[in-house]
Image: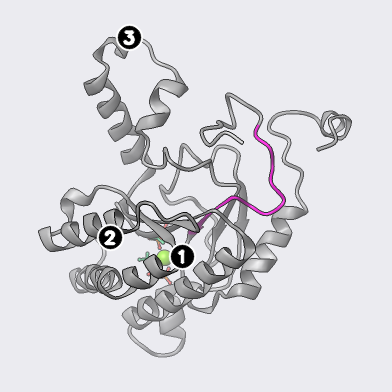
Amino acid sequence: MALFQSSTCDIPIAPQVPRHIAIIMDGNGRWAKQRFMPRVVGHKRGVETVREVVTACRSLGVEYLTLFAFSSENWRRPADEVTFLMDLFLKMLEHEVSKLHENNIRLKIIGDRSRFDDNLQRHIAEAEQLTQHNSNLTLTVAANYGGRWDILQATHAMLRNRPELASSFTEEDLAPYLSMHYAPEPDLFIRTGGEERISNFLLWQLAYTELYFTDTLWPAFDAAALNLAIQSYQARERRFGRTSDQLHMNGR
Ligand code: IPE
Ligand code: IPE
Ligand code: MG
């Protein structure tokens, strides 16, 4: 199956097990608050959920897992929480990357990294380089990421590279410049924590993704909760604009 299949230019094959799962990991602060603990305890506990979900995805045969860790709007939070999250990100890169590499996992970071300090930027570049040829699972962490930023940066980069496209360009022209150009569009989107919104996540790529919302807070999400989301996905009919009858005639 072609990697760069677009849900609007082509009719993609809907896989039984999602090839690509994208998750908004929400509810860390509320999880901690329910336990009368500072919000940041929830962020720390959330890292354990990341480990469990990565392991579960590998054993299910999911090829791409994309996690929203920090949005372009999360800078609006109190400074001490932002600092804690940056430190946690750095610690994750310092301590987890060797384990990811041993497990043949490729790590990618998407988002505007120019706002991160030099040390964090260096760790990101090194982690991506170390794991770039791994083939078991591609784990993408979206950090200082925004869907609108992504579309704008892609457009700017495309026009810098190919100024002749300024008067007219196609989806196919733009696609290679989007942050997730290396992955198929997500089959399944999960948001934990009860909110039912996209919060400026993968705006372009979620065009035909199946959306799943759960009240479970991210630190309490686990392999069983992931299985429930996948079961919900498997019960859906992905029509990509066609009628149900057409799907049955084509046998899919
Ligand atoms: C998600 O949990 C983590 C980040 C946005 C970094 P929250 O911190 O948003 O937790 P709630 O939504 O306040 O419970
Ligand atoms: C979305 O969660 C971003 C991440 C999980 C990184 P938020 O908690 O920031 O989203 P809103 O503000 O409730 O929409
Ligand atoms: Mg939140």
Most distant residue in the bottom direction: 36
Which amino acid is tagged 3? Ser
Locate the N terminus and report the quarter of the image it occupies: top right
Tag 3 near tag 1, CB within 8 Å: no
Tag 2 near tag 3, CB within 8 Å: no
Q: Which mark is residue 229?
A: none
Q: Which mark is residue 167?
A: 3
- For label 1, being within 8 Å of ligand 2 is answered yes
Q: On the image, which quarter does residue 32 sit in?
A: bottom left
**Colour treatment of the image:** one colour
| Predominant SS along the magenta part | loop
In the image, 57: left or right of 252? Answer: left
What x and y, as percent, mark residue 164?
Answer: 28, 10
Verify whether residue 232 appears in magenta: no
Which residue, given by chain and number where applicable, does mark 1 sit on?
A: 25
Q: How crowded is mark 3: few (under 14 residues within 10 Å), some or many (20 or more)?
A: few
Which amino acid is tagged 1? Met
Label 1 sits on a secondary structure element that is loop
Q: Which residue is drawn at 18% across and 69% down?
A: 79
Which residue, given by chain and number where applicable, does mark 2 sit on?
A: 127
Q: Which is more N-terminal, label 2 or label 1? A: 1
127 over 43 or under it: above or below: above
What x and y, as percent, mark residue 144?
Answer: 28, 53
What x and y, as percent, mark residue 217?
Answer: 52, 73
Most distant residue in the left direction: 118
Label 3 sits on a secondary structure element that is loop
Q: How crowded is mark 2: few (under 14 residues within 10 Å), some or many (20 or more)?
A: many
Q: What stretch is highlighted in magenta?
A: 12-23
Query: Label 2, label 3: how many angstroms apart (C-alpha)?
Result: 38 Å
Label 2 sits on a secondary structure element that is helix
